[in-house]
Image: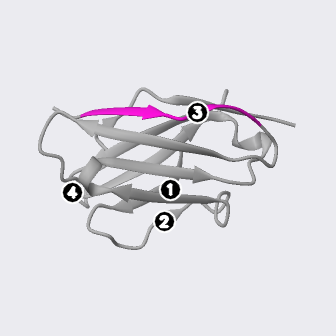
């Protein structure tokens, strides 16, 4: 079984930065890809960013392109989300997720970390 644990959320003013981390444990960890999703109050969960474990080009939601950067450290089984130029509309619970093939959905999820951006 895979456990994903996020950290790094918090309260920040608009224009500020945060870095989220997600560390995996529980089995030999070699996913196909990991991603970050978020869910704001009253809204559906949405994709934020994703990266393949083999080092392919990352992908981003249009709303965060140029502001957020996803990266990974394979040796630490950790994926990061650097968030710059934060906006109040970035306020949400952020979840990391993993999948082990390129066809299926993300099947493993962390518990989420709250990010609040004040105006």
Instruction: Work out whether mark 1 precedes mark 2 in sequence or the reverse, and give the earlier one.
Output: 1
* Residue that numbered label 2 is attached to: 59
Lateral position of residue 52 relative to residue 45, left or right: left
- Of the numbered discs in the image, which one, if any, rests on residue 9? 3
Q: Is residue 83 magenta?
A: no
Rounded to the nearest angstrom, the CA distance separating label 1 from label 2 is 5 Å
Q: In the image, which disc is placed on residue 49?
A: 1
Q: Residues within 10 Å of mark 1 (few under 14, many from 20)?
A: many
Check whether the beta carbons of the residues at disc 4 and disc 3 lie within 8 A of each other: no
In space, the residues marked 4 and 3 are separated at their CA atoms by 28 Å
Query: Mark 4 or mark 3: which is in front?
Result: 3
Disc marking residue 89: none
The CA distance from mark 3 to mark 2 is 21 Å
**Residue extending farthest bottom:** 57
Q: Which residues are magenta?
A: 3-12
In the image, 41: left or right of 69?
right
**How far, Cα to Cα, is label 3 from label 1?**
16 Å
Sequence-earlier tag: 4 or 3:
3
Quadrant of the snapshot with the N terminus: top left
> Image point 75% across, 54% down: which residue?
85
Local SS, label 4: loop
- Answer whether residue 5 is magenta in the image: yes
Q: How many numbered marks are there? A: 4
- Cβ–Cβ under 8 Å for marks 3 and 1: no
* Discs 4, 2 touching: Cβ within 8 Å: no
Q: Are marks 3 and 2 in contact (CB under 8 Å)?
A: no
Give the alpha-carbon distance from disc 1 to disc 4, as whole Å. 17 Å
Q: Pointer 4: what residue?
A: 101
Question: Are the residues tagged 1 and 2 within 8 Å (C-beta)?
Answer: yes
């Amino acid at each position: 079984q895979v456990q994903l644990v996020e950290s790094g959320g918090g309260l920040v003013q608009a224009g500020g930065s945060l870095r989220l981390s997600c560390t995996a444990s529980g089995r030999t960890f070699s996913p196909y890809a990991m991603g970050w999703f978020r869910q704001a109050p009253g809204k559906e969960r949405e994709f934020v960013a994703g990266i393949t474990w083999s080092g392919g080009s990352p992908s981003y939601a249009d709303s965060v392109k140029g502001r957020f950067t996803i990266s990974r450290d394979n040796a630490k089984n950790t994926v990061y989300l650097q968030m710059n130029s934060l906006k109040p509309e970035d306020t949400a619970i952020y979840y990391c997720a993993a999948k082990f093939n390129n066809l299926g959905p993300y099947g493993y999820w962390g518990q989420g970390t709250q990010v609040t951006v004040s105006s």
